[in-house]
Every structure is written in C-alpha cells, then in structure tokens.
Amino acid sequence: MNLSYWEQKEWFTAIDFTIVGSGIVGLSCALELKKNHPKAKILLLEKGMLPQGASTKNAGFACFGSLSELIDDLKTHSEQEVFDLVKKRWEGLQLLRQNLGDSTIDFQQNNGFELFKDKNFYEECLSRKEEVNQLIFPIFKNSVFSETSNIFNFENIQPNYISNQFEGQIDTGKMVSELLLLVQKLGVKILNNIAVESYTEGLEKVAVKTNQNEFTTRKLFIATNGFAKQLVQENVQPARAQVLITKPIKNLHIKGTFHLEKGYYYFRNIDDRILFGGGRNLDFKGEETSEFGQTTLIQEALKAILKETILPNTNFEIDSSWSGIMGVGNQKKAIVKPISSNVACGVRLGGMGVAIGSLIGKELAEVYK
C-alpha cells in the first residue's frame, strides 16, 4: 500500500483497538468500546466491499428458536443450557432494538410459525409444547408457543402450525447501515477491502499483517464468525446458507416468519416478496465451506417447496439468490473469550447473529475490562 505520511498518521498510528469484521458483532463491539473508552482510537477492518459473512445476507429473523429446534437442543444440552441460550438470544434482540430503534431497523412482530410435513413429528412436538413453554416462561412471563390453524393456506403440511407470539422480523440491510453510521459518528475508523492475514503478539502490542500493509495495535478483537478459523484455533466451522427471493407478488397475503423441517428451511414476507432460505441439511459436508455460491441441489429444492407448499396457487418468479457464511460448532453457545493478553474473539453465533450479535459484541468489548 502506497501510504502517505498523513494516511499513516491518521489511520495506522497509535491504535488502541482494532476489530476484524464489520458485521453485527464487530460493529456492536466498536459501539461498546467507544462508550467505555470515548477517547480511544478504534480501527475496524473489513475484507469485503460490504460486511462479509451473514450479517446482511441472512433472512432477518428476530427469533430465538422454534419449538422443534429447542426440543432438538434438549437432546444435546441440559435444560439450564437451553434456558440460557434462549435468554441470551432474547436479551440480545432487546439490546439491538434499544441501540438502533424499532423503526430504524423496520422491526415488526408478526409472529413466527412452524410448519410440519410429518404427522408423527408434529404430534411429538405438540406433546412437548407445554414442557418447553414452562422451561422458558421466566424469560417471557407468558406462554410462547401455541397451536394455530393453517391460516395462510399452505399445502402438503399438517393442518395446524405451532405459532410463536414473540418472534419478529427486521431489515438487516438497514440494521448494518445504521450501525455503521452510528459508530462512524462516534469516530470509529472503518476500512473496507482489507483482509487480515495474520498477527504476532508482543508484550504490549499486536503486530497485524493485512493484504495491504502492516501496523500495530494495543488490542485486537476478532469478530469474523464463519471465517474465524483463518485466525483462531477454536471450535467453529463455516456453514453456508443459500437464500433466494421472489419478484413482487400482487396481493401477497403471507405475513410473518416461518420455519420448516426443524428450522433447516425458513421464509418470510418482505416488500411484497417471499424470501426463502435453507436446505443445508441436504448436503451438510458440501455446505461446510467459506466459499460463497449456490448449488443446483439446494436451489432446486427451495424452488420446489416454494411451488408445492408456500405458493401452490400463485404465479411467481425468482428475482435473485445469494448465500451467507455462518459460524457453527459442536455447541450452540457462542465463543467469547480472550485468546491471549491482547487478542480476543467473539465467534460461533450458530445462525443466531441477529438475536445474539449485539450482546456478543458487547461482551467482546468487555473481555479486558
């Protein structure tokens, strides 16, 4: 990089905190660091033109787990662990709304609905509805899950849904745009198209090597989630999620956030369109990648479900498709920890970035408090 004296002095000298990744975690971390250290010089590096990963590539569900997902979690986690997961997701959503405001992120609480194809599986989930409601009752002070008839006339599913009165939806483009504006107003410097390749820790500083230059920082925070394995040795793997969206549909009556097949498929309304994603369960190994892209297998499955279940009697056209990279692991709990005396990470959001991203960013900023 051909840096002038002025550029070197303004952007790469006397840096207190450097954050890698400008998604919801990195931006929330910067926001909290500025609150706690108003005079600190903070640099935020992003390898893409826009935030990579999943922050602006997800479906914008303000959710904390469908009934079948929570029942599935109880097979591998204790009741206390599942309770803590839901509590953290709910608190994270409230922090996001508090930081940015509902109108700014177009937050809507149109309820969440879980659809079932298999009758036995539906009845199994229904039989455990009250058990799960009781488990998480202290968080919401109300029953979360209830049974609802097929009000949207979907086909090839069971006659009733499981609805969630506390689930909402947001516009994640607006969310990240507002977070960027907020932290820049506070004086955080954000540089795009810079990829951190490695770092070397000294006694009091960290030497950071990027694809453009090298510099030192007092503390380094890694918030790259699905891309974390490039910089940290933690239990986090990339998981690609493929998404498509229809062109506007006249008189679209579907409203809310919807889960299908244990949450491996999910769809919602947005701007008179249906946004539909998922299908990772069709090829777990193939989707364990940090490469963006779509596959015929998953895209065709999404289109088939759109036609046969979601919009069976409606003409529609696909407008575009894309993918995002999540960070998952053998546990649902996010990893927020110091790696050393000057380097910390906040990764493995498990597909719940909208819900927990703000809170994980806040916790990451407070690692060295």
Image (tube, rainbow, N blue to C red):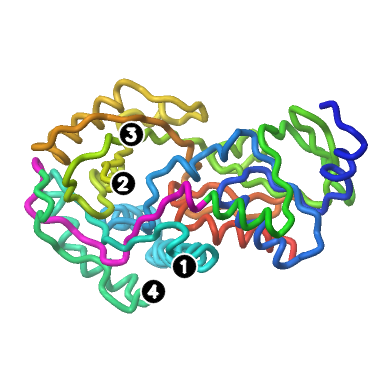
Q: Does residue 169 belong to the magenta stretch?
A: yes
Q: Does residue 353 belong to the magenta stretch?
A: no
User: What residue would you read off at disc 3?
Assistant: 244
In the image, residue 248 above or below residue 283 = below
Labels 3 and 4: the sequence-earlier one: 4
* Residue range (magenta): 155-175
What is the three-letter code of the residue carrying label 1? Gln
User: What residue would you read off at disc 4?
Assistant: 139
Residue 53 is left or right of residue 316, and the answer is right
**CA–CA distance in space, label 2 to label 4:** 32 Å
Labels 3 and 2: the sequence-earlier one: 3
Around disc 2, counting alpha carbons within 10 Å, would you say few (fewer than 14), some (14 to 19), or many (20 or more)?
A: few
What is the three-letter code of the residue carrying label 3? Leu
- Which element carries disc 4, helix, strand or loop? helix
Labels 2 and 4: the sequence-earlier one: 4
| Residue 173, horizontal then vertical, whole percent | 47, 46
Query: Could you tell me how many numbered marks the image carries?
Result: 4
Closer to us: mark 3 or mark 4? 3
What is the three-letter code of the residue carrying label 4? Ile
Residue 26 is left or right of residue 317, and the answer is right
**CA–CA distance in space, label 3 to label 2:** 14 Å
The numbered disc on residue 51 is none
Residue closer to the observer: 164 or 1: 1
What is the three-letter code of the residue carrying label 2? Asp
Around disc 1, counting alpha carbons within 10 Å, would you say few (fewer than 14), some (14 to 19), or many (20 or more)?
A: some
Labels 1 and 4: the sequence-earlier one: 1
User: What residue would you read off at disc 1?
Assistant: 94
Closer to us: mark 1 or mark 4? 1
